Every structure is written in C-alpha cells, then in structure tokens.
C-alpha cells in the first residue's frame, strides 16, 4: 500500500472469498485424484460453471491494487518467481514422483505476474488516460479477444485459422500447438485486459472515491486470506495433497488390518 492511503477492506474480503472458493474447488479435484472418489470429480465439474465469476473478481481486484502498490512491477517480478517454482515442481519434479497430468506452464500466477509488470511499466500512461475511457476500451478488448485459447474471438462468434496455433512458444498469449497442456491455464489474451480494466478503475481507489462501506472490515478471516492471497495460493495444493495422502494411508491401513 502507498503511504497515507486507507485500506479498502472489502477488496481484501472479496479476494479472500475468491481464493477460498478456489481452494474448495481444487480440493474436490484432489479428492478424486488422491482418494479416487468419483463424487469429487463430479462436484468439481459442476462448479466449473461459476469459476469465471471468481476469476474476474480476483483479477480485477489485483488490477485495482496496482494503483495502490508502491512498486507493482517489482511485486510482479516476485510473483513470477513463485510461478516459475510452480512450473518447476509440477512439470519436472511431480512427474518423477509418479504424478502426471498436473503440469502448469502458464497459470494464474504467471498471468498475474506478467500483468503486474506490464501495468507497472505502463502506469505513467495509465494515469494520464481518463479511467472511464481506459476501462471501456479494456472491456471491449476483453470481449473481442475472449476465446482465443479455443481458436475463437468475440465469445465464439469469430473463428480463427488453425495456422495461428502451431507453436507452443506463443501459449502465454493464448496460441498453442497440438499436444500443449497446462492444468491451470490463464493466457494473457484476454485476461490482461481484465487486469488493466481493474488498473483503470483503481483510480477510484487512489482518489478514495469508493463507497464508504468498502473501507469497513467485516470478516477477519476473509480479510486475512485476501491480504495473503499469494501465500495461500502457493501453499494450498501441497497442504491439501498432504492431508489427503494421510487420509488415504489411514484408509489403506484400516482396511488392511
């Protein structure tokens, strides 16, 4: 936070809620993977329908917070370090331990890290543009580019040629070749426009023009999770896997005796 700025607790709480919902969603998938219970997969698939709501909320708030951060580019670089660690673990270490299909080449942390760096570098320009104009342009660009990772644009109305999808090197942008897989995949197109939308709207946070109710804390738990969202995201999968592994070992021990 920049010095002298009031903390907007509702942003922390919404971000905390989004993170906890993500943890629950991932737990359901892990229940299927580790414990072999089909209802975990079923619940995971059913909840996919509401995922975009929490994605949008989390990324917009992250964009807004760049306007309140002292050095968003440096923070983005830190996030990219953690993202690289996740890629190292999921793509190179876990397969050696017998866990495959969980590789993350360009997930939410990769996307947010790049967005933070880009927003930090563009911040002088962002501050010069009327936030209503900037937010409107970003919303339009998001609508235009939505679906690029599935070879479409404008929510499926425009079909893109297969020739654009040949090389995995462009996967961070949403263009990838055959055989590419990332268990968590957030290409820059269209999500960078959601982030920049938040960066423009964040002008209201900088000017402290948000409704007064947003500055009041309502949930200590959600506020804490929201303030420490990076650490919660990085730690939640290893913790969930460890807990479920212990549960599976207890079940195996019980039935073997």
Image (spheres, helix red, strand yellow):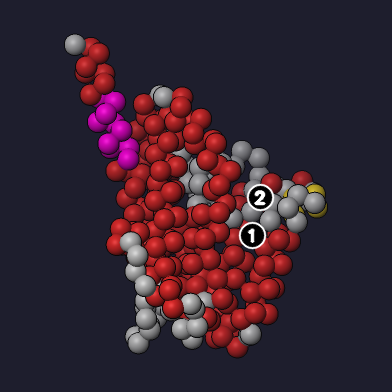
Task: Please tell me whether mark 1 sits on a helix, a strand or a loop.
Answer: helix
Is residue 165 shown to the viewer in this render? Answer: no
Residue at 39 percent across and 39 percent down: it is 27
Mark 2 closeness class: few <14, some 14–19, many ≥20 residues within 10 Å = many
Quadrant where the N terminus lies? bottom left
In this view of the protein, can residue 193 be seen by the observer?
yes
Q: Position of residue 79 (x, y in %)?
A: 41, 63
Q: Residue drawn at (27%, 36%), measured in percent from left and top?
A: 243
Classify 138 as above or below 3.
Answer: above
- Which image quarter is the C terminus in? top left
Residue 149, numbered label = 2
Callout 2 touching callout 1 (CB < 8 Å) = yes
Q: Tell me, yes or no, whether the highlighted magenta stretch contains residue 243.
A: yes
Region of the chain picked out in magenta, as a range: 240-249
First in sequence: mark 2 vs mark 1? 2
Q: In the displayed image of the protein, which residue is found farthest to the top?
A: 257
- Our reading of the magenta stretch's main secondary structure is helix
Nearer to the camera, 20 or 138: 20
Residue 230 part of the magenta-drawn span? no
> What is the quadrant of residue 181 in the picture?
top right
């Amino acid at each position: 936070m920049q010095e002298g700025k009031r903390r907007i607790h509702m942003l922390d709480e919404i971000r905390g809620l989004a993170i906890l919902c993500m943890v629950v969603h991932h737990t359901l998938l892990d229940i299927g993977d580790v414990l072999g219970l089909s209802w975990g997969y079923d619940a995971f698939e059913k909840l996919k329908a509401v995922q975009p709501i929490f994605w949008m909320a989390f990324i917009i708030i992250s964009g807004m917070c760049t306007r309140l951060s002292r050095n968003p580019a440096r923070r983005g670089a830190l996030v990219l370090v953690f993202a690289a660690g996740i890629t190292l673990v999921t793509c190179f270490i876990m397969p050696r331990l017998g866990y495959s299909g969980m590789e993350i080449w360009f997930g939410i942390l990769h996307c947010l890290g790049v967005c933070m760096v880009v927003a930090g570098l563009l911040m002088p320009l962002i501050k010069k543009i009327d936030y209503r104009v900037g937010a409107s342009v970003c919303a339009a660009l998001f609508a235009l580019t939505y679906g690029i990772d599935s070879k479409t644009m404008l929510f499926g109305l425009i079909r893109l040629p297969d020739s654009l999808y040949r090389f995995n090197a462009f996967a961070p942008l949403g263009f990838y070749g055959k055989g590419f897989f990332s268990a968590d995949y957030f290409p820059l197109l269209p999500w960078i426009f959601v982030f920049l939308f938040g960066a423009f709207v964040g002008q209201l946070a900088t000017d402290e023009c948000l409704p007064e109710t947003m500055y009041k804390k309502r949930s200590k738990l959600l506020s804490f999770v929201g303030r420490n969202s990076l650490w919660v995201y990085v730690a939640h999968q290893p913790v969930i896997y460890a807990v479920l592994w212990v549960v599976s070992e207890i079940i195996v021990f019980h039935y073997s005796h």
